[in-house]
Image (cartoon, helix red, strand yellow):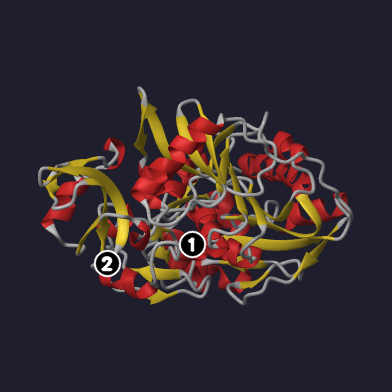
Amino acid sequence: MGCVLAFFVRARYPVAFKMDLPQEFCKAMEELLGRQWGDFLQGFQAPAFKGVRLNTLKCEEKTLRESLPFPLAPSPFSPLSFYAGADAKVGALPAHHAGMFYSQEPSASSAVTALQPLPGERVLDLCAAPGGKSTQIGALLGGQGLLWSNEVVRGRAEALLSNLERMGVSNAVVSNCPPQQLCGALAGWFDRVLVDAPCSGEGMFRRDPQAIAEWSPQHVQACAQRQRLILDSAAEAVKEGGVLVYSTCTFSLAENEGTCAAFLEAHPEFVPEAIPAAFGRPAFDGGPARRIFPMDGGEGHFVARFRRVGANPQKRAPFAPAAPDRQRQEAGALYGELFTDSPEGLIGVFGGKALLLPTGLPDLSGLHVLRAGVELAQAKGSRLEPAHGVFMSRPKGSCRRALDFPSDSPQLLAFLRGEEIDCPEKGYTAVCVNGVVTGFGKASGGRLKNRYPKGLRLRG
């Protein structure tokens, strides 16, 4: 049963509060925060934090700032994360279509800061949709090593795939696999594993009324139980000496400190470890985990880091390409027609699609993989047609032909609406905004026939 807190809060604190929050949630939070309960409520009445995260795979900070119609302010949660004004509208911006940034509440970047992925490593994001943390990991890997992004819900996995493609992440595998099955098959295979666990979403209350409607003490306990099962699976995937990071966007003791304590009790092969950042505040159990409340500059996050000190040898066989050499040669020839550099890794052909595969893949069989690497082309009868994904993964300087427009160009906006535009080139041509590729078309007779995917186009 909900309670409108206006009277309750005014009776005890000099703030006006309009949200209808569950009474049992309020009681638990007052007990948790003590004297800071009033500060928490005062923070809750303000607009939710909005932000963007720079995608260094696509551009530098200077280019991003020049491409946005609003200013950015640094956040304490990641060097790539910035606050944007509460009125900032981002989805229709050309810079968004080009993958220059990911729209993300700033404190959500704290989990990957704690994970600290390094180029060349193998990293698993076990509960990855819609892709905010996976695309952040991808940027920090810089195209080196392997990112495995998993999401058990198929529809959300498709959204994850789309976001990784937009952000130009070329060395990712996207799967739709139950955590126990995936981690058991890839035991000991990853240097770092992130579990951004499904939770009761208390840190989403200011942004999502549905999170309030779904909250209950029973829901909190069910989430805590599910989180422990997911962590049990994730533990299998971490190699000896590797790092496991657990995060939520909720305030609950049961889902945060309680889940971590249960995990450590069940897994003596892991030890808690300090987070290499000073955002937020210490956890309530005195351990090295960090908490973020609205009065700390974020909507609500909890982040804990563990190190595996016990042995865990990997057993998965390496990937073996099965496509005929002729198909790979044809796909390689098409790549050479489009770009001046050489493709990295293997070219694979699966079900009429040619892919640029990351190096160092394991055997993918039985793991519900939606895509590995970048889609290069699709078979159209006897010929190959270039795919949107391969252009999104390449810089302008690698494209044999490119059109470049400022972010407010009418020609650029027409392209993003799916229209033909003028083009002096001939052949497949990239379309860029401020030097960053956002799509492509095929030019002939002074016009560029649009190849921007219909599902991504601007409306109106």
Q: In percent of the image, x 39 and y 50: which residue is there?
A: 166
Residue 239 image-quadrant placement = bottom right
Is residue 55 among the parts visible in the rendering?
yes
Q: In percent of the image, x 86 and y 50: which residue is there?
A: 312
Image x and y of residue 51, in percent = 39, 64
**Horizontal placement of 136 versus 290: left or right?**
left
For disc 1, the marked residue is: 299
Q: Pointer 1: residues within 10 angstroms few (<14), some, or many (20+)?
A: many
In the rendered structure, which amino acid carries the disc numbered 1? Answer: Glu
**Horizontal placement of 117 versus 455: left or right?**
right
- Asked if marks 2 and 1 touch (Cβ < 8 Å), the reply is no
Q: In percent of the image, x 67 and y 36: which residue is there?
A: 320
Q: Pointer 2: residues within 10 angstroms few (<14), some, or many (20+)?
A: some
Image x and y of residue 361, in percent = 66, 44
Is residue 31 among the parts visible in the rendering?
no
State the residue in front, 112 or 39. 112
On screen, 206 above or below 288? above
Image x and y of residue 373, in percent = 53, 44
Helix, strand or loop at mark 1: loop
For disc 2, the marked residue is: 68
On screen, 37 above or below 191? below
CA gap, disc 2 and disc 1: 23 Å
Which callout, 2 or 1, points at the residue further toward the start of the chain?
2
Helix, strand or loop at mark 2: loop
Q: In percent of the image, x 26 and y 58: which residue is there?
A: 432
Q: Residue 88 shows which numbered tag?
A: none
State the residue in front, 432 or 295. 432
